[in-house]
Image (tube, helix red, strand yellow):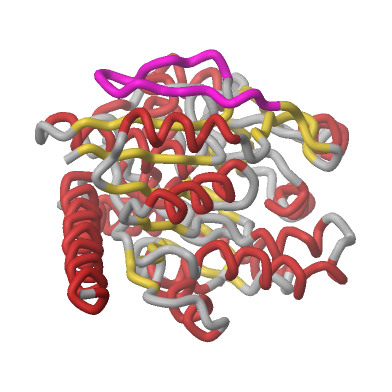
Amino acid sequence: MKIAIITETFLPSTDGIVTRLTASIRHFLAEGHEVIVIAPDLGVTSFGEARIYGIPARPLPLYRTKNFAMPSPKVGKLLKEYDPDVVHVVNPALLGAAGIYYSRKYGYPLLASYHTNLSQYLDYYKLSYLKGLMWSYIRSLHNRAAVNLCTSHTVQEELTSRQFRNVLLWKRGVDTELFSPTQYSPVMRERLSQGQEGKKILLYVGRLAVEKEIEKLRDLFDASDQFVLAIIGDGPHRQALENHFKGTPTLFTGFLYDQELAQAFASSDVFVFPSTTETLGLVLLEAMASGLPVVAARSGPTVEQIRHEHSGLLYDANDHNDFISAVCRFEDEAVRKRMAEAAYQESIGKGWSEAAEQVLGYYKQTILERKLKHNEEILNSN
């Protein structure tokens, strides 16, 4: 099968979308499929045997730390030259809009996938008045695809209620060979604990943006002196966060990758996840696979992944005391160990192969349905 993936974000960026795509592409290539990726031009031209075609990219006014590619006729030219069996447009908004347009124009079987709650992000940038327009625009793009994929049951229900058509679930996964308790490193623990032996390490991993609500984590230090915080990642909100956490035992590492990131997970004690804007949050499963219990704001996607009082604790995002009491439960090492083991056990068997095979099945079904529709059109025209 010749697969074309058109995405708003790809390597060297690091986020849940890129993690899912690279894991899937690895599996596609191993199964003998051909893959090209059309993405913002960030200097990467290949991933394994998959060719990456870059489209010129630049920052946007509201997000100057990330480059975005605008719709371009180059997308149509690349598709015509490659002549794929199927096109998968990931998170269509800007570059993806061109992917939708040219796939439809040339009659390629087309899937889209939804990964980012853009309309909810508008609340954090004081643009709530644009939410109706945003939903209308995103829906119009997705409904040009034969199949729409999403990453949680909660999002599936919301998209369906908003008249997105043919919305199917794309399973979550984790690299269980990379993320594992065996990655524990005394050197990494010393680094993350900032030399404060005996303190428990709270870990946050992700993009540093206002909608992630990372500021709320600071409240803990007014209630307990038993924890330090390590924040891994980068983004437009980093400087504001560093100012906000000044004077607290908080370490900002910037991005960590591959084994170093896996060591950070496995060498910490508790994973904290304050965001309620995620469509899934793959870092939750990476933390659980590393043997960390999770403290997360209650939302549809977190409820699907975390069993309260078993693999972690869920708290009311609007109740600051609920967050503090949840984290302070882990001052008790017996409680932490019990939930850590449960979290690890729940991650077993959730490698990426099953999720990648599932999406290959969606590709094959979309190709078949496009052929049947084409044959029907020929018969009706005679």
Left or right, residue 345 beside residue 184: left
Q: Residue 113 sits in which quadrant?
A: bottom left
The residue most toward the bottom is 161
Residue 331 visible, this orientation: no
Identify the residue at image location x=32%, y=44%.
Answer: 291
Range of residues picked out in magenta: 42-57
Q: Give the percent coordinates (x, y) of residue 21.
A: 37, 39
Q: Is residue 176 above or below residue 168?
A: above
Q: Determine if the magenta segment contains residue 142.
A: no
Identify the residue at image location x=62%, y=35%.
Answer: 72
Q: Is residue 361 above or below residue 298?
A: above
**Of 333 and 49, the residue lying toward us:** 49
Q: Residue 9 sits in which quadrant?
A: top right
Identify the residue at image location x=52%, y=69%.
Answer: 314
**Of 77 and 344, the residue lying toward us:** 77
Q: Is residue 172 above or below residue 94?
A: below
Q: Quadrant of the N terminus?
A: top left
Left or right, residue 374 beside residue 247: left
Labels in figure, total: 0
Q: Determine if the magenta segment contains residue 54.
A: yes
Residue 283 visible, this orientation: yes
Q: Give the percent coordinates (x, y) of residue 221.
A: 74, 47
Left or right, residue 237 beside residue 142: right
